[in-house]
Amino acid sequence: MRKIILMTICVLGSGFMLAGYAQKVGEFSYQASFPTGKFGDFIGKTSWVGFSGGGRGYLKSNEQLSIGGSLSWFYMADKKGKQTFTGPEGGVTTGNLTNFTNIYGLMAVIQYDLKKRNEKKVPYIRGGLGGAYQNQNSDIGIYRIQNDGFQFMMNAEAGVNFNMSANNGIVLAATYHYLPEASGMVTTSFFGIKLAVTSFSY
Amino acid sequence: MITKNSSRGLLKILLSVALFSACTPSSPDYIADYDLVYTKERSGYDFSAVHTYFLPDSVAHVGGDSKHIYDSTILKSLKTNLDALGWTRLTETGTEKADVMVFPAANEVTYASCTAYCWYCYWGWYPGWGYYPPYPGYGWGYPSDIVCASYNTGTVVVTMTDPNKAANDTIPVAWVGILNGLLEGSQAEITSRINTNIDQMFIQSPYLKQ
């Protein structure tokens, strides 16, 4: 419970801070994700379902630095087919295995633009910290094993914002998400290629 | 041009999508994809000492009113696999004691559920309509659209015990094999799946053949 409260304060806090900024930017993105590490054993296939959106405000003291929040949803599935595996107590199971998960993330984000905002191409780096609700499922035979709960969520991102006009832009970025092991769920980590549309208001 | 208001609208749409979206993979294509085979042996049991076995000529059925349609399939498949281990089947009329006894048991369960789709059932009495019957607090007695589904599952449990090591009124179980799946499809299909999955019990238990 303390973890959930901390995550909520973190994200809402960054949202309230937006009110004090002169320039704000909204973003909506689509992402293809590539599971890595232990999570890659759970889901080995590329995910084509990932969406996120949010807003940031640029600091008056540093026009290349912006702070905000984001909300994201990722769905990943891997139909592994007929598998034989040994359980923790030594029993051997054979069956048709399908693993899948839905991840709902809420993060506070901070972004630093490596060039001035009015440049045609603005490379940037971004970091995010918050929480996520995830439900990891394994379907085998007629049974489903589900582990779900709240986890911390961290994100690192590097990309380029292509300004199409004074108000709109397109973003192409590489991202990495990490959610530490919790509630029986395996550590979740995945790289992603993100395409986003942005809109600025002054 | 996307304005501040349209950005907010976009965010609202995203929030709605995120809150109400949860994907699940499509169901398996074939009934056989629901089959499950589980085996486990007693840790440290010496299967190399097993040379003879006893297999009854019937399958015990737990609950239900089974017609014993697949008993011969189960027994024949077990005998084939046990013989392939190099073990010899003994009969109950013989004088020699078997090293292990293999007991097959089967169980059939029907699962059924019904769901009512009735969005208008939540409408109740509007207080502004006064005290005409049926009075406030009553709901409408609409019939709802009910969708029902049922499916049968079958389980075969093969228990291998060692009667020669019985102690304290307990016969130790040396190995257990469990097959679970949907009892759907033609009799020929189910027979084929039983054979395949009993074979799988022995394939994933290589320690039996020593």
Image (cartoon, coloured by chain):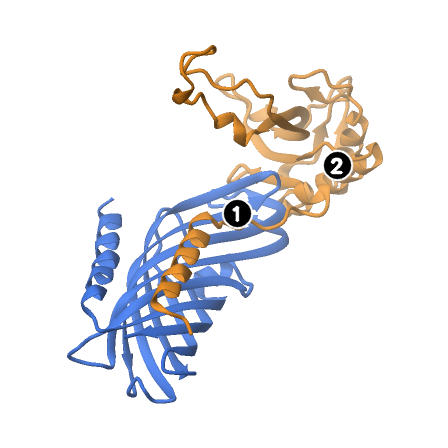
Determine whether, in the image, residue A55 is placed left or right of residue A37.
left
Mark 2 → mark 1, Cα distance in angstroms: 24 Å
Give the drawing colour for chain B.
Answer: orange
Crowding around mark 1 (Cα neighbors within 10 Å: few <14, some 14 to 19, many 20+) is: some
Nearer to me, B130 or B73: B130
Residue at 48% x, 27% y: name it: B122
Q: Secondary structure at mark 2?
A: helix
For image coordinates 41% across by 63% down, the residue present is: A52
The residue lying furthest to the top in this view is: B133
Amino acid type at image mark 2:
Ile
Residue matched to label 2: B194
Residue at 60%, 34% in the rendered image: B176
Q: Is residue B15 above or below residue B136?
A: below
Q: Secondary structure at mark 1?
A: strand
Q: Chain of mark 1?
A: A
* Letter of the blue chain: A
Instruction: Judge whether B1 appears above or below B141 on screen.
Output: below
Whether residue A18 is visible here, answered yes or no, is yes
User: In what quadrant of the picture does the C terminus of chain A appear?
Assistant: bottom left
Q: Nearer the viewer, residue A91 or A1?
A: A1
Residue A9: x %, y % from top left: 21, 54
Q: Position of residue B196 (x, y in %)?
A: 75, 42
Image location (x, y in percent) of residue B109: 65, 24
Query: What chain letter is assigned to the residue under label 2?
Result: B
Q: Position of residue B99 (x, y in %)?
A: 65, 30
Q: Is residue B63 left or right of residue A177?
A: right
* Residue A114, picture quadrant: bottom left
From the image, tell me which residue sits under label 1: A138
Q: What type is the residue that disc 1 sits on?
A: Ser
- For the residues tagged 2 and 1, is the chain the same? no
Q: In this rendering, which labeled residue sits more in front, label 2 or label 1?
A: 1
